[in-house]
Amino acid sequence: MTWWLPVVLAAVALVAYVVGSATAQRQRRRTTDDLEAELARVTEQRDELQQQQEELERVALRDEVTGLGNRRFLRDRGAELGPQLADASLLLLGLDRFKEINDSMGQSAGDALLRQVTSRLLECVRTNDLVTRLSGDEFALLLPDAGDWTAARTADRVLDVVRRPFDLNGRSVQARGRIGIAHGYANVRLEELLRNADLAMSQAKAAGSDRACEFDEVMAADTTQQFSRDVEMRAALTNGDFKVYYQPLVDARDHRVVSLEALIRWEHPQRGVLPPSEFLAATERNGMIVDLGRFVLHTACQHTAGWRRKLPWLTVAVNVSERELFDPDFTAQVAGVLAATGLPPEALVLEVTETVLAAEDQITEILSPLTGMGVQCALDDFGTGHSSLSRLRHLAVDEVKIDRSFVMEISQDGAPDSPFVAAIIGLAHSLGLRVVAEGIETTVQADFLRDQGCDELQGYLFSKPVPAAKIPAILRADRAQQPPAAV
């Protein structure tokens, strides 16, 4: 072997080592750069995920419409207070007519109402108090370290701001509230406060709303009884124990029957025939009033369509609750019942109470399509609510019914103790409206009202409410199938 070959091989090996070391160093540098870039990407993704998680947590704890905390947020706050809940009070606020406003004016108006209520509620509380929205029309106010007096004062302020008109899409809309108040006690849990406040709020609603009620133990017992009664009433509706009775309305001049008012009765198997005063408030509370109203409307139209085959001038009046009236499907339901029963629209009179006229614009929108169909509308219990005769000019009503409380003022010599009855008859006629007086019990009352020009009379003097089976005999005896006197 020549002497230079080992030298060459050693040189080649050295060069390969140097080149390999440089390549390895470059690879290590690239690997380090790649790792740092990957770490940056992972860190960025982690931050994004954390922000998304925080946003999800925020959304999960907040009401989207009002921005207030929701039920979960309230629970978390209750858990934070722990034993301090014993010194807290919880106010549960429900808005009357929220569903009707939302359905009749649209969701945007309903959302605007909720936001305006929220703004007003925040003005009523202290800085450490919590206002949350629990559901559609319910708000909860958690007041730490608040006794009976503080809770009552806060409730008064809330009711005051809620009863002020709201501006919704340029329209002035009235709303009312009902509040249940529950006070803390040793070892109380937030869910118990919510349950107690809900029971108290139901009591406030049953008492007429626009008021606050404090929870007491009697309410818990009453709730058990209410549940049993609700079950019994639903079974009665299913079993046909609710019946439609009819009370005649007579022409004031000759006392011949011109119309009938449909009235609901509960033929209880143990307690006998029960009037609406025994159960109607409960149906308003539990929502049965809608099903009951549909039953009365359909039954009354069906019966009257049959009676009109011989008495074609006969009409029937059906009472409509506020809850039914503001149902967005109400007009369609009335049209459907008329079509199914064959009753002409002009033979149906829908009676609404005067108190619903606080929402005058909405009532006009609801009644106008019905009157356009030919259905007649009557304002019941006139003189006891919010309307005036001047407002009747703008309402789609055909008739007013003078409340029985004013009829009772007519003395035995035929003179009223106040000029209201005579005045309302004259002014209503000037507006082209019929006038009906209800609660007539004496001939003196009937004669006075006739002399004042009242159009129709209703009361026990002529007939008490009777089952449908007795109406044909009453009509035959009363009229011998002769038409009413000409107007």
Image (tube, rainbow, N blue to C red):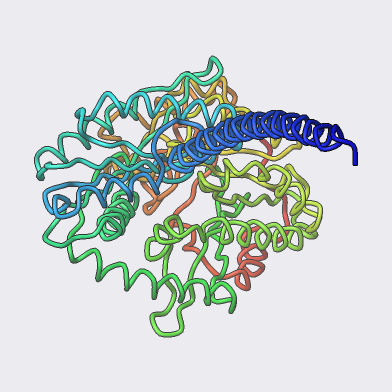
Residue 284 lies, with reference to residue 152, above or below; the image says: below
Q: State the residue in front, 107 or 122.
A: 122
Residue appearing at x 42%, y 56% in the figure: 285
Residue appearing at x 52%, y 61% in the figure: 288
Q: State the residue in front, 341 or 336.
A: 336
Note whether residue 355 is visible: yes
In which quadrant will I find the N terminus? top right
Residue appearing at x 27%, y 37% in the figure: 130
Instruction: Give the total of numbered labels.
Output: 0
Which image quarter: residue 141?
top left
Q: State the residue in front, 186 or 337.
A: 186
Task: List the single residue furthest toward the right.
Answer: 1
In which quadrant will I find the C terminus? top right
Image coordinates for residue 433, horizontal then vertical, percent: 57, 29
Note whether residue 397 is visible: no
Image coordinates for residue 239, horizontal then vertical, percent: 58, 79
Task: List the single residue furthest toward the top.
Answer: 170
Q: Is residue 68 left or right of residue 85?
A: right
Q: Is residue 357 left or right of residue 185?
A: right
Residue 388 lies, with reference to residue 190, above or below; the image says: above
Residue appearing at x 66%, y 39% in the figure: 376
Image coordinates for residue 74, horizontal then vertical, percent: 33, 46
Q: State the residue in front, 108 or 3.
A: 3
Image coordinates for residue 337, horizontal then vertical, percent: 74, 54
